[in-house]
Image (spheres, rainbow, N blue to C red):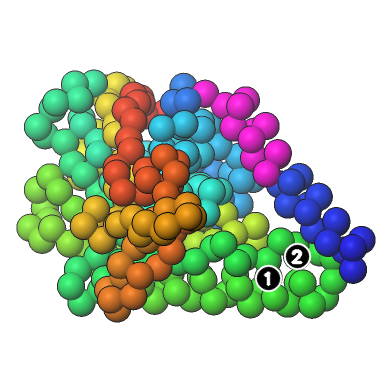
Amino acid sequence: MKIITAKLVLLALFFAFAVIANAQKLPNVQQTSLRVPANLKIDGKATEWDDKFQAYNKATGVFYTIANDDDKLYLTIQATNPQNITKIIMGGITFTITPSDNKKDKNGLAITFPKYDKKNPPVYVILDNKPKSTKDTLKNKMQADSFLNAHNQQLNDKLKLIGVEGVKSITDSVISIYNTEGIKAMALFDNKIYYTYELSVPLKQIGLTVAQQTKFSYNIRVNGPNKGNIRVIERDGYNDILTYTGADGVNYGIGLATPENMTMAYPTDFWGEYTLAKK
């Protein structure tokens, strides 16, 4: 038993160090323009990119890649930290695009996924009890597969809406993921329980073409949950606990009320610039 436990700990540490090492090698903001792979699908998987990304942004704690073809702009994001994943799922990510390099350009648009409404309240996922290994024993693999399938089913059931601002052809502020406007979004967990988020937006909705070769600005914001639902429970003689009140009225423990965990209650974002890549 001690040998198996030691192997689990070592494997968990290996994945953690691998993530940190990869993040340290990447720029904070993407530096290059890319064409998307020919086989790219908006399916919540980063396999077309071999799970490799163009940047790791420290402010938001996400790996990401922006790319394009002749018709669409694509955003792929991956989060590996459980608390950051929870923050992303509960509040969504807003991708703001301005058709120029002026961040204050009022002709920009903003896409938020996932988006929630009163009939479809935010999802709260608990990742602290995720299996540590998928390889050591058949039992461990079955537990990991069951955990993965259950959480992905939860995402498939709840992540049905996209928030839209500034798109002239769309009058509603919230649309279905099955919309006819060409905006696609999906998110899933992989077998490491990393969260991958994919979004594509038609270039015609942004007002850009590959032929123009215009540099434009973008903003990626991790919104986080409604601050009114986050609170600190003080415990005499113990560390304070940060909790989230779900739509069911239940208080869910996020973790110790550390500065890192408190970022759950506040949006984090960053700006970058991109020029559409030609063939």
Q: Is residue 171 visible?
A: yes
Across and down, in percent, residue 76 comes to: 46, 45
Q: Give the tally of numbered discs.
A: 2
In the foreground, 253 or 78: 253
Question: At x 81% / y 50%, what residue is drawn?
Answer: 10
Q: Mark 1 sits on what residue?
A: 144
Question: At x 9% / y 48%, what residue is drawn?
Answer: 168
Above or below 275: residue 248: below
Question: At x 43% / y 64%, what residue is drawn?
Answer: 253
In the foreground, 180 or 139: 139
Numbered range of the magenta stretch = 16-27
Across and down, in percent, residue 70 comes to: 37, 39
Q: Tag 1, which secondary structure?
A: helix
Amino acid of disc 1:
Ala
Above or below 254: residue 110: above
Q: Mark 2 sits on what residue?
A: 134
Q: Is residue 76 visible?
A: no
Above or below 188: residue 138: below
